[in-house]
Image (tube, rainbow, N blue to C red):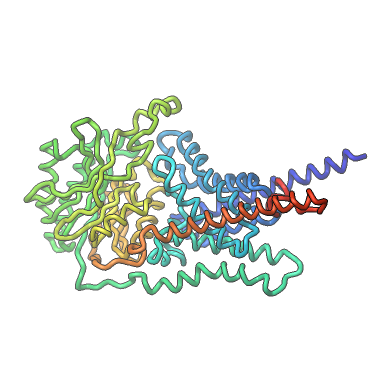
Amino acid sequence: MTGRPFATVTARAVRVVALRALLAVVAGVLLFASFPPRPLWFLAPVGIALLVGVSTAVPMRRRAGFGYGYLAGLGFLVPLLPWIGVYVGPLPWLALAAAEAVFVGLFGALVVHLRSLPVAPLWIAAAWSLTEWLRSSVPFGGFPWGRLAFGQPDGGFVSLAVVGGAPLVSFAVAATGAGLAALALTASRRPRPVRAWTVPVAVTLLGPLLAAAAWPLVRTTTDESSTVTVAAIQGSVPRLGLDFNAQRKAVLDNHVARTLVLAEDVAAGRAPAPDVVIWPENASDIDPLRNADAARDISAASAAIDAPILVGAVLVNDDRTTTNSVIVWDAQTGPGERHDKKIIQPFGEYLPWRSFFRLFSEYADRAGHFVPGDGDGMVTAGGIDIGVATCYEVAFDRAFRDSIDAGAQLLAVPTNNATFGDTEMTYQQLAMSRVRAVEHGRAVIVAATSGVSAIVDPAGRVQQSTPLFVPDALVAQVPVRADVTLASRLGVAPELVLCAAAVAAAGFVLVRGRREKAGAAARTSTGAAGAPAGGRFDKEDL
């Protein structure tokens, strides 16, 4: 007689858990859908709201919150990162997505942990900031791809980048989402006193109101008295994939040829004369410091266009390691200042634990032997101080921060996306450059081997762009800036404050839980009936 009710309850519990798991995956998919090239930035707070709602609608243990968060992380990162495996198979792509989803799982656990605090949506948003910082820091230097801020270049929150950089934008998106979840939870409860709406409404509106207040600080106009003319060259490559550089001379020839075409257009009056020309990463995988033919071709291009060229080149060191560099090359003086890429890509430009990972993939030994450079990331070309973040570096806050501190007036992102085919990677990376433009109040020049190259103004708007896989040249007059934004002045401080707030809130809940447990034990020892230890978020394991 008791078996049937028990079976019914068990079946119902399984259905409830399955539904919540499905909703968690949907939350992750909504986060993915908010990223470029789709203009659906407003789905990001909805995705956060759904995940927070799944984790707070009923009491559950932190490990259950981790599980739902992990599922959301898979729903988010698996469709976001397929470009990782486009030429090397699905294992690296799925392994990276699975590893990075752990941080979203940690967020889910923190949601459960913090849900009983006053003004819980704010602490929950700070917890997202903490997990983004962790994901951007560890392991192997971190992987910042997929930060909420990088889905917002066309959104209403992006103006906050001028105040607190990408971390503040992500926090605002997360706070709005957590506020929406609190609103839905309040609406579902009876009774609903008026004061119960105060916190959900206030937190939901906080991000949009702060973004509106920050918008006047965004550089939306150009001072014509302080501009330079810049060209970005997209020479394209003979073929895509990991073997694109097997024809290294052809890649260099393509960029030389497209620069010569631009020189002809300038001579004919069809294009303005540039003050500086920016070539992409890997424009010359033949070391021009060791190869006289490559040096001669680059000098010829510089002479024809009558401007220095920032040349993306792979340099071979004496110990046979390589350096991913951007060299200022002038026809008259040859190679000058250079930026050696400081933040190099694990599993691409170098392979940690090479002997271990080669057990899992035949492509392991195709990872490079690059070594990181040092310096502040700034070079001077044609009298212009240019901050350089090469490809992967643009995802990291510190890359441009160092060059801005050194006095960079203009920002450049030379990049090579040929190894990722026609995936969404190039659009995701362009979005990062657009956020950086707002963050630092600088124009950003994106020069890509195969696209998308772009001219981005200080407000993060794309003024010009190229199609994929087409040789092209962009020429534009852009502002140069000497002053800095509030975000540039504050540096890492906003992120540290948000992370510290999350840690403090989590610590407070732990201390409170221990006190409650001690109090319950004391009441039990004197015969009093105590409440379950651990707080209300530990009542069920769903």
Residue placed most toward the observer, 251 or 290: 290
Side of 284 where 75 appears, left or right: right
The reply, left or right, for residue 317 in relation to residue 454 is left
Q: Residue furthest right?
A: 1
Using residue 213 as the reference point, say whether residue 390 is left or right of it: left
Question: Which residue lies at the image location 53% right of the left edge and 56% below the top edge?
Answer: 504
Q: Position of residue 235 (x, y in %)?
A: 24, 47
- Quick one: 251 or 366, which is closer to the camera? 366
Q: Quadrant of residue 168?
A: bottom left
Name the spot of residue 46 as percent of width and height, x first: 57, 59
Q: Position of residue 12 (x, y in %)?
A: 78, 46
Which residue is painted at 32% across and 45% down in the image?
Answer: 343
- Residue 303: horizontal and vertical position, in percent? 9, 52
For the question of whether residue 308 can be seen, the reply is yes
Q: Is residue 25 visible?
A: no
In terms of image quadrants, where is residue 45? bottom right
Quarter the N terminus occupies: top right
Q: Residue furthest left?
A: 332
Q: 295 above or below 186?
A: above
